[in-house]
Amino acid sequence: DVQMTQSLSYLAASPGESVSISCKASKSISNYLAWYQQKPGEAYKLLIYSGSTLQSGTPSRFSGSGSGTDFTLTIRSLEPEDFGLYYCQQYYEKPLTFGSGTKLEIK
Amino acid sequence: QVNLLQSGAALVKPGASVKLSCKASGYTFTDYYIHWVKQSHGKSLEWIGYINPNSGYTNYNEKFKSKATLTVDKSTNTAYMELSRLTSEDSATYYCTLGAMMVIGYWGQGVMVTVSS
């Protein structure tokens, strides 16, 4: 199985700052990577797929980059509603696998 | 507007089975795959498998092949996942999700399954 590693389990930042969340795959997955957001009491939300394509409705302050094994989710100018949990997931091969998540909290 | 309405929380005894439901609305049921995902308390997400509602074709994570059975009822736009021979390791939140092939686009609210005597 492809192991997905999110090295930072926790990240604190202030509104207005920019942050980057990294995700590393144990083998090359091309750009078959998605990013999800979860906020307390809400359903998971797809933010980005194909490594860098914004899902409809995802604010433009979100961006995704990377291919192969190393990927990054960047959020420019954090808004209060951006705080929550972020997961990466590969869909290059089955079984689909997820990173362990990064919790983004308000500093 | 896509909606995946999952059945309520379940408390089940060890060794028993449970069948979870997921009623889909807001889109053509047969156009997208239904994936199921497990999240154990405080842990990350595990993909269980998916079903193609149009053909009934299923694909399982090897880890869950003897644990989960995915089915659909096209007449009611409802997907089901039956979990068998439950143990404490099966206590978790289970998500019904909607996928365009392998990209999971929408998630249900999740249903908590607790296995306890």
Image (tube, grey):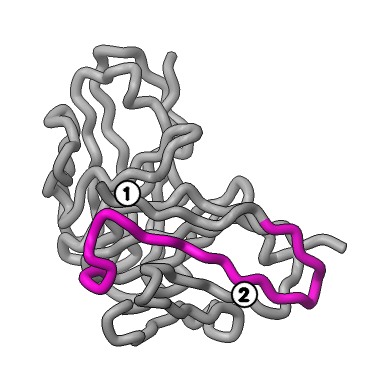
Q: Is residue B26 left or right of residue B116?
A: left
The image shows residue A42, relative to residue A91, as above or below, that is above
Kind of residue indicated by mark 1: Cys
Check disc 2 and report the residue beneath it: B83
The chain letter for the residue carrying disc 1 is A
The residue at 30%/59% (across/down) is: B104
| Disc 2, SS | strand
Coordinates of residue B103 in the picture (x, y in percent)? 25, 62
Coordinates of residue B102 in the picture (x, y in percent)? 26, 68
The image shows residue B36, relative to residue A98, as above or below, that is below
Range shown magenta = B10-32
Q: Is residue A58 left or right of residue B6?
A: left
Coordinates of residue B11 in the picture (x, y in percent)? 75, 58
Q: Is residue B28 magenta?
A: yes
Q: Quadrant of residue A104?
A: top left
Q: Nearer the viewer, residue A19 or B94?
A: B94
Q: Is residue A43 magenta?
A: no
Which of the numbered marks, if any, corresponds to residue A91? none
- Alpha-carbon span between mark 1 and mark 2: 31 Å
The chain letter for the residue carrying disc 2 is B
Check disc 1 and report the residue beneath it: A23
| Disc 1, SS | strand
Kind of residue indicated by mark 2: Leu
